[in-house]
Amino acid sequence: MSKANQSTALPRPIRRYGPLAVLGVFSLWTLVPLFWMFLSSLKIRKSMFEFPPTIIFDPTLRYYQDMFLGSNPVTPFLANSVIVALGTAVLSVGLGTVGGYGLSRLDLRGKKHLAFWIISTRMAPIVVVVIPLFYVYKTAGLLNTHVGLIIAHTTFNLPFAIWLMRSFFDEVPVSLEEAAMIDGATRWQAFRKVSLPLVLPGMGATAIIAIVFSWNDFIFALIFTSNATQTMPVAASQLVTQTGTLWGQVMATGVVILLPMVTFGVIVKKYLVSGLTMGAVKE
Amino acid sequence: MAQIALNHVTKEYNNGRIVAVNDLSLEIEDGEFLVLVGPSGCGKSTTLRMVAGLEDATEGDISIGPTRVNELEPRERDIAMVFQNYALYPHMNVRKNIGFGLQLSTDLSDTEIEERVEEAAQLLEIGELLEKKPKALSGGQQQRVALGRAIVREPEAFLFDEPLSNLDAKLRKQMRTEISRIQEQLGVTSIYVTHDQEEAMTMGDRIAVMNDGELQQIGEPNEVYNYPANLFVAGFIGSPSMNTIETEVAADGTHLEAAGGALTYDLGADDHPDPDLSPGDRVTVGVRPEDVSVRAAAEAFTDQTHRATVEVVEPLGSDNLLYFDVDGASWTARVSPAFEPEPGDEVAFSFPRDALYLFDDRGVTVESRDLTDPAEAEQVTAADGDGAATR
């Protein structure tokens, strides 16, 4: 390192602890509300709004009991959420994989423009398309169906899925497929037996992103579903009623919405990281 | 095993705006090892890829054995290819990598495939690596696996696309011998693409030199080295490159004069028959570095001695390479390691009439080094051998 560089470098303690401080603040910023939500879901209504909040208290599970065993259980909504999220993931990953493969391998004039056009469809805010889509759905009879919501979510996931999968296929050397084709494979076999296994982490990463989007989506679900097909976020929103907010239920529902995603995230973390960074370094 | 033939093959890109291979005709004999050599972008890899079926020929016919293969898919051509980056399947272990082709293209039973894989692994001495993934292998081992994948299929032809260029120098030499050995043992027709002229010289039964998409010369290594068809081949084959300088035939018709006057050469020396040149002809003179004799003192030691200032001395151990400037052209001489002038030293250099190459103004060879009489060639070496001259 040159002298000039040394003189402009930050003092050692800042270089060392600075990042930790920033990460610490970030962690507090994201985790404290979640922690607060979790604690509140176990508190009776009175102690929920005490200030300063109590950390040690007598926990109650009545909101959770209410949610699953009460007169209006959330289980069907949870099932809706799972169906829609998985459907969206399968469709997004499937179409994203073939689309990404095509975009990566095809020698096409104006490929850059095509790619940009695909991603540009993702740039419109959801609210802009919701009303026109509503009419389309109404005519097509897709309102209040799982399929309708899956299609809506896939539409919004697909551009990203295609781009993500394309970048994964870009990292798989063409010569691997060529070698396979010389070895006796058809183009399809080369794709399926050589390229596809190599982009599995990418497919995993794409699936996760699709699931998270679908699981958390509120607007599409609110507009396109009714009672029978409602997903968890919409169900949670209905706990805010004209006569008051059922805070305990809101908090418990929040935890139930969050928990599967967090668990899922922890399980696939390694996979996701290897997926998102695969090929970051050229071999 | 089969003969491979290319008949007036042309490859164009962008609707003819780029001509990668231009009207190439080649015949590779059954069991022959042909090396396609040339600088990068000369069309050699494109040629190989057309034979493999990875690129379509724009014009011309390609045949393997009696079959015209232009319209056949790569998998239908019964060839095996070794890629520069080896192209091993990262998610399969070595055993599966080698057996993959057999599984796809034959109806052999698993046991038979197993046997063939073991056999190939034994031939390449990679038996103990069979369960490993490519990532766990060194470059040299990966190269062997790539070779194994090719030979296990017992194809009509091997295609090699610069297979050694990712290896370090020592390993490269070792694998060079290995590939030659295996090819000879199996007797499979092979096309080997490289930009390394040394690889071409040492490995090929014949070498085909390409430049700008066109075949420059095809022949046995020594033939191409000793009798290059043109200035390009002369400069490309041989390391260090042939020394060249542009000259003009003087009014007397037997003297060559470089433009700057730094060099004149009497073609009539040593009772050599005159080439067919007329006064005023532009002629490029070429001399191989090993044919240039250099003396320390700037004195005349032959009839035709020239002077130059040493710019760089490169000791190779067995020889020293001297670099000096001749009228703006950088020349090299390969001399005995005992002769070590300092950069900046004035030296005298000379080259025998027999060692001369002459090229006309289009670069076509007019005259090559005269090796017809071995006794005479030996005499030349002996004459130069005294003192600190050439090897």
Image (cartoon, coloured by chain):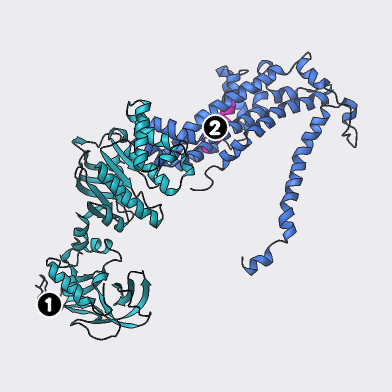
Q: Say which colour chain B has.
A: cyan
Is the residue B179 above or below the residue B151 in the image?
Answer: below
**Percent coordinates x, y for residue B69 in the rendering:** 24, 36
Q: Which mark is residue A158?
A: 2
**Residue at 36 percent of width and 51 percent of height:** B164
| Quadrant of the rendering where the C terminus of chain B is positioned | bottom left
Q: Which mark is residue A256?
A: none
Q: Chain of mark 1?
A: B
Q: Marks 2 and 1, how far apart in space?
A: 81 Å
Q: Chain of mark 2?
A: A
**Percent coordinates x, y for residue A210 in the rendering:** 59, 31
Q: Secondary structure at mark 2?
A: helix
Q: Would you say A243 lies left or right of B220 here?
A: right
The amino acid marked with disc number 2 is Leu
The residues colored magenta run A152-163
Disc 1 marks which residue? Answer: B270
Chain shown in blue: A
Q: Secondary structure at mark 1?
A: helix
| Quadrant of the rendering where the N terminus of chain B is positioned | top left
- Of residues B139 and A256, the one nearer the viewer is B139
**Residue at 9 percent of width and 76 percent of height:** B271
Observer able to see residue A131:
yes
**Percent coordinates x, y for residue B198 in the rendering:** 30, 58
Q: Would you say B11 lies left or right of B372 here?
A: right
Q: Quadrant of residue A248?
A: top right
**Residue at 50 percent of width and 39 percent of height:** A168
Observer able to see residue B54:
no
